[in-house]
């Protein structure tokens, strides 16, 4: 049985074309709202195929076979059987906000985080559930901020960074308090639309903006722009850091894919290697599969088996987000404009989930 839902909200690609307008609108939309627990509505619990445009997909480390998917219109869906069937997950901000990111806490079971923006200030911010979505509450300290990116540090999930129009905020205590990284008079990235921690060093953080990537190595006290080899107007949608060779980075941009071998000091474009200057929304290395990397682009999903030297297209559907089965990285889930597609052979072949 198919689940049919209203297809509202813009794709992330369209949003990026409107980024300048979005930033100007967001700057005047601040208001203060006290954090409160919000009971979620209760949609029909009938599982079925997911056929709406999906912008984010994440796998749950704590519950085998469980995945979350989200749309630009802040609809949330959950699968308990490895993406074959999906159930709408109650979320009070659905159709009232734009969803940019979903995180599943790798250390604390049943805990999800979502980052939202909205023209209505009370519908923006970071929302968290600790009971798999039964209730949600807004995290204190970011009530006045539109949230376009979130990142957890793998060494301690209490360390979270949030990307906003005003720059990067970081918490070291799971969202009880936040610090705006960078001095008021110092150079710092803003607005921030993507984030990535160095897996071994919480003080090293990469931030993507509509004009290049930035890096801090001292916990945000100072930032510097990573510009060498990258087009000056590059809108950085995603940054990936190799956990084993931390100087090896990929950056997905509006004009294609970039690679760095020296921690962002210099970049080389992979436009020819991937076949064109495609918008690259996400880059992800397959855990445990040496050299296997995927890029989710406007022209489809592209795969490398040699660490990014050569690439081949494995799906023609525009792709937005990538997740891996924690129990078997050969099972790969990709958010597309027609739902979630699935591979069971390390990305060599894909099919529609539930097909």
Image: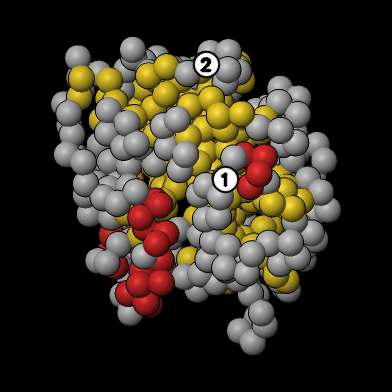
25 displayed left or right of 311? left
Q: Is residue 176 visible?
A: no
Rendered view: 272 above or below 190: above
Where is residue 226 drawn, in percent x and y? 72, 65
Rendered view: 55 above or below 20: above
Q: Which residue is mark 1?
A: 276
Q: Which residue is mark 2?
A: 349
Where is residue 338 drawn, in percent x and y? 32, 31
Disc 2 to disc 1, how far (Cα)?
A: 22 Å
Q: Residue at x 27, y 33 (%)?
A: 52
Of circles 2 and 1, the one toward us is: 1
Position of the C terminus, as image quadrant, is top left
313 displayed left or right of 247? left
**157 or 288, which lies in front?**
288
Rendered view: 25 above or below 79: below
Q: Quadrant of residue 313?
A: top right
Marks 2 & 1, CB-CB < 8 Å contact: no
């Amino acid at each position: 049985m198919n689940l049919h839902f209203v297809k509202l909200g813009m794709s992330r690609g369209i949003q990026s074309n409107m980024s300048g307008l979005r930033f100007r609108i967001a700057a005047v939309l601040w208001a203060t709202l006290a954090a409160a627990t919000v009971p979620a509505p209760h949609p029909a619990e009938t599982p079925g195929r997911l056929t709406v445009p999906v912008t984010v997909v994440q796998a749950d480390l704590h519950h085998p076979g469980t995945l979350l998917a989200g749309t630009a219109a802040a609809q949330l869906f959950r699968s308990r059987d490895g993406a074959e069937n999906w159930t709408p997950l109650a979320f009070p901000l659905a159709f009232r906000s734009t969803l940019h990111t979903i995180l599943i806490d790798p250390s604390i079971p049943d805990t999800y985080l979502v980052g939202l923006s909205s023209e209505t200030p009370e519908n923006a911010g970071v929302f968290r559930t600790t009971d798999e979505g039964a209730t949600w509450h807004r995290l204190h300290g970011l009530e006045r901020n539109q949230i376009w990116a979130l990142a957890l540090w793998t060494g301690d999930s209490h360390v979270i960074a949030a990307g906003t129009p005003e720059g990067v905020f970081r918490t070291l205590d799971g969202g009880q308090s936040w610090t705006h990284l960078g001095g008021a008079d110092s150079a710092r990235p803003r607005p921030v639309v993507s984030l990535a921690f160095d897996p071994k060093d919480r003080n090293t953080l990469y931030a993507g903006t509509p004009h290049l990537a930035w890096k801090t190595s001292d916990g945000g006290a100072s930032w510097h722009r990573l510009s060498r080899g990258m087009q000056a107007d590059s809108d950085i949608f995603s940054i990936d850091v190799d956990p084993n060779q931390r100087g090896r980075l990929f950056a997905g941009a509006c004009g294609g894919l970039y690679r760095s071998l020296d921690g962002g000091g210099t970049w080389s474009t992979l436009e020819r290697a991937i076949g064109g200057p495609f918008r690259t929304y996400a880059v992800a290395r397959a855990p445990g599969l040496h050299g296997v990397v995927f890029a989710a682009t406007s022209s489809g999903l592209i795969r490398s088996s040699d660490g990014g030297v050569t690439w081949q297209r494995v799906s023609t559907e525009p792709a937005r987000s990538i997740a891996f089965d924690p129990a078997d990285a050969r099972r790969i889930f990709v958010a597309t404009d027609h739902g979630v597609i699935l591979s069971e052979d390390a990305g060599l072949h894909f099919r529609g989930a539930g097909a």
